Each structure stands twice: as structure tokens, then as C-alpha cells.
């Protein structure tokens, strides 16, 4: 609209999730008029991350090195392995500070409708992981969508015999949840899985 | 959280307007897992724009060259000059396709509370512009905030004698506006400035 370089920047900003034409323009103008040095720093951080961040050879999460800090950390519990769909899930669980075991990232969930089969996920690598290292507990922390649950069952079948026990995340009422607004599936699960006070 | 390069990217993404920690993480993970080449292209476009885009020597809008395409365009009407606060306003007016004159960007509005006085805006440059080129109509298109209106009056005083007429944007009911939800100031202005059908 104003200049070729500006249009180029606006177009490229639209690759960011949730950013449309208007937000991209607003971002570009904000950086250009008020934050040029920060804009240049962002460009460098982006380039550095896109070229430098690899997949961890062990857990398939994101890493600057061949093996990620979580896999390298000697203080973590080798007997527990938490299987998640994406690196974002690793971050979410780490933020709870409630888990000290290892992770394994599948790279998605089974979804025949999108053409994602077991071969597209890191399931062979997971089988190799659990056969090479002795694991007591495999925690299935895939999503509670139909695809996530199907994936959990598939993994349980594939690797369950190599580990002592297979668990999955509790399903129930979320913190701060009002019962009257909760869907009946979740409420039903919460009732079924009720525990002693 | 996951890797140093990742944290760096998340921190830098937060410079974008409206992007907090969670959105920045989501953006970084989206680019890393699905759009690496586009992420690298974005980094290049950003760096290119931040280093390459200058202020137009004539209208003070954004430009790749010393003088911007709008100032260079021989088909535009030299007798009209539209004074706006920012380059974003130039884009907004260009998108209406209702104006074929020239622009002048002030670089903000007068705001004593933020310490922005006439010296911080391109007012001297505007006086020079209108004294060097003969202009019939100066259109004041600053915002309808108190600061924008004050700025408009200040400019009218400063350069009004060098031009044939000074106009400002019409104030009234916006398109698609329901009268009952409109503030009384705007409705009052719309009533005062009513026109023949």
C-alpha cells in the first residue's frame, strides 16, 4: 500500500496464527514508527530460531542441541515417561511444576480423516525408547478429543507390554468450573471417577 | 522454557502490539513446527523493512526511497493537501479511494500531558511545504480526540494564511450506526451539521 517493503512485511506477518491483514498492518506500523531496534532484534531471533532449533533425538521435542535440556537433566526421574502430542504440551505440563519425569513427543495424533496414520507419528521411536530404557510408568497425556483418545489406545496397545503400568490424565471438572455450565460428557466422567475427600 | 533460542524468540515476539506471553508461545511453536521457511522469510522481510524504510522527505510518510510513491505520482492533485497524524492514517484514507490529492504526516498530535509540543511534530516542515507549493485546500484529517482537534486548530492558525481554504473531515453518524447506541456528542454534531437530502 505505502511501499513495497511495507507490503512485503505485512504479507509475511500474516503467516503468524491469528494475524489478519489489519493486525499485520498495525504490527508493521507499530514496529516502523516506534520500535525499529526491537524489530531488527525480532528478525534476528526469528532467523536464529527457525534455522537453529532442531528436534531432540531422544524425546522429539524442540531443542537447540541434538538432545534437549529436559532429556539431559540428570535430576529427572527416568522411570516415568509422559507421552504428549506436541512440544507445546511439554511446555504446558512443565508450567504446572507437578511432573519430574521424562517426556516423549508424538508429533500429533492419529487422524485418518487428515491422512495421519501411525507411520506419521513417532510411534516406532517410542517403542524403541521404552524397549531400550526400563520404564515403570507410561503416562498418556494426549488430548481428550476423539483423535487424542484413539491415539492413547493405540499407544497403549503398541507399547503397554514393555512398561509396568500405563496411566492417563484424570478427567473431571476443571478448576474454577461451574457445574451448570459444564458439558454432560465431562460431568459424567467426573462423577464416574469421583474420589474420596 | 524449552530452549534458549525459543525463549529468545518468545520474548522478542512480545514487542508486537497485542501479543502477550501465551500468544507469543503459540506463534513461535506454530512457526517452528509447521512454517519454518515462512518464518525465515518473515525474518528477512522484517529486517529489510526496519533497515530500509525511511521517512519521505516531502510528506513524512513511510517510503523505500527519499520521496514516497504518493508524492512522486504526477497524477495526484497538487492543489489539495491532507494533513494526518500518522502513516497509518494515509493508508486508511487511501483505502477509501475517495481522495486524489497529496498528504502530509505530522507524526502525532499535540499532547502536553505526554510532553509532545509543536516542536516534536513536523509543523515547521508543513509551513515550509505550504509556503513553497501553492495549495488551494488544506484538509485537516487529525483525530476527533481532544488532542487531535487541538492539533487541527493549532495548524489552522499556523498555516491557514498560506492556503486558500482550510477544511476538516465531516463529523456525524458512521455508516451502519444505530442512533440509539451513538454517543450524544456525535449525535449532536450530526444534527448540527445536517445536510440537504
Image (spheres, coloured by chain):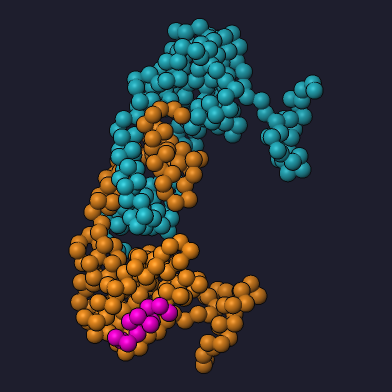
Chain colours: A cyan, B orange
Spot occupied by residue B23 in the image (x, y as percentages of width and height): 48, 43
Spot occupied by residue B183 in the image (x, y as percentages of width and height): 61, 74
In the figure, B152 relative to A103: above or below?
below
Can you see residue B83? yes
Spot occupied by residue A14 in the image (x, y as percentages of width and height): 38, 50
**Residue nearer the viewer, A165 or A37:** A37
Please say whether residue B160 is one of the residues in the magenta stretch: yes
Can you see residue A124? no
Give the total of numbered labels: 0
Side of A136 relative to B95 (left or right): right
| Magenta-colored segment: predominant secondary structure | helix
Side of A161 relative to B115 (left or right): right
Query: Which quadrant is home to the C terminus of chain A?
Result: top right
Seen as rendered, the residue at the extreme bottom is B196
Side of A66 relative to B1 (left or right): left
Image point 29% across, 73% down: which residue? Answer: B124
In the figure, A179 relative to B55: above or below?
above
**The magenta segment:** B153-163
Q: Quadrant of residue B9?
A: top left
Image point 42% across, 33% down: which residue? Answer: B7
In the figure, A170 relative to B45: above or below?
above
Query: Which quadrant is home to the N terminus of chain A?
Result: bottom left
In the figure, A16 relative to B124: above or below?
above
**Residue nearer the viewer, A179 or B122:** B122
**Residue nearer the viewer, B175 or A168:** B175
Please say whether residue B174 is one of the residues in the magenta stretch: no
Image point 77% across, 29% down: which residue? Answer: A191
**Residue nearer the viewer, B160 or B11:** B160
Q: Quadrant of residue B181?
A: bottom right
Image point 40% across, 78% down: which residue? Answer: B154
Q: Quadrant of residue A165?
A: top right
Spot occupied by residue B60 in the image (x, y as percentages of width and height): 28, 67
Amino acid at each position: 500500500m505505502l511501499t513495497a517493503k511495507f507490503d512485503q512485511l505485512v504479507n509475511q506477518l500474516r503467516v503468524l496464527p491469528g494475524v489478519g491483514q489489519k493486525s499485520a498492518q498495525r504490527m508493521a506500523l507499530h514496529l516502523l514508527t516506534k520500535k525499529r531496534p526491537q524489530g531488527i532484534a525480532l528478525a534476528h531471533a526469528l532467523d536464529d530460531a527457525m534455522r537453529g532449533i532442531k528436534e531432540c533425538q531422544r524425546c522429539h521435542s524442540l531443542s537447540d542441541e541434538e538432545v534437549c535440556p529436559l532429556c539431559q537433566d540428570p535430576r529427572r526421574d527416568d522411570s516415568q515417561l509422559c507421552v504428549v502430542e506436541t512440544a507445546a504440551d511439554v511446555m504446558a505440563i512443565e508450567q504446572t511444576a507437578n511432573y519430574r519425569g521424562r517426556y516423549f513427543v508424538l508429533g500429533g495424533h492419529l487422524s485418518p480423516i487428515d491422512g495421519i496414520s501411525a507411520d506419521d507419528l513417532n510411534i516406532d521411536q517410542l517403542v524403541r525408547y521404552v524397549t531400550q530404557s526400563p520404564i515403570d510408568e507410561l503416562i498418556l497425556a494426549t488430548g481428550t478429543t476423539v483423535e487424542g483418545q484413539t491415539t492413547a489406545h493405540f499407544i497403549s496397545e503398541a507399547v503397554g507390554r514393555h512398561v509396568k503400568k500405563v496411566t492417563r490424565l484424570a478427567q473431571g471438572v476443571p478448576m474454577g468450573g461451574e457445574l451448570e455450565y459444564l458439558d454432560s460428557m465431562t460431568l459424567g466422567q467426573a462423577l464416574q471417577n469421583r474420589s474420596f475427600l
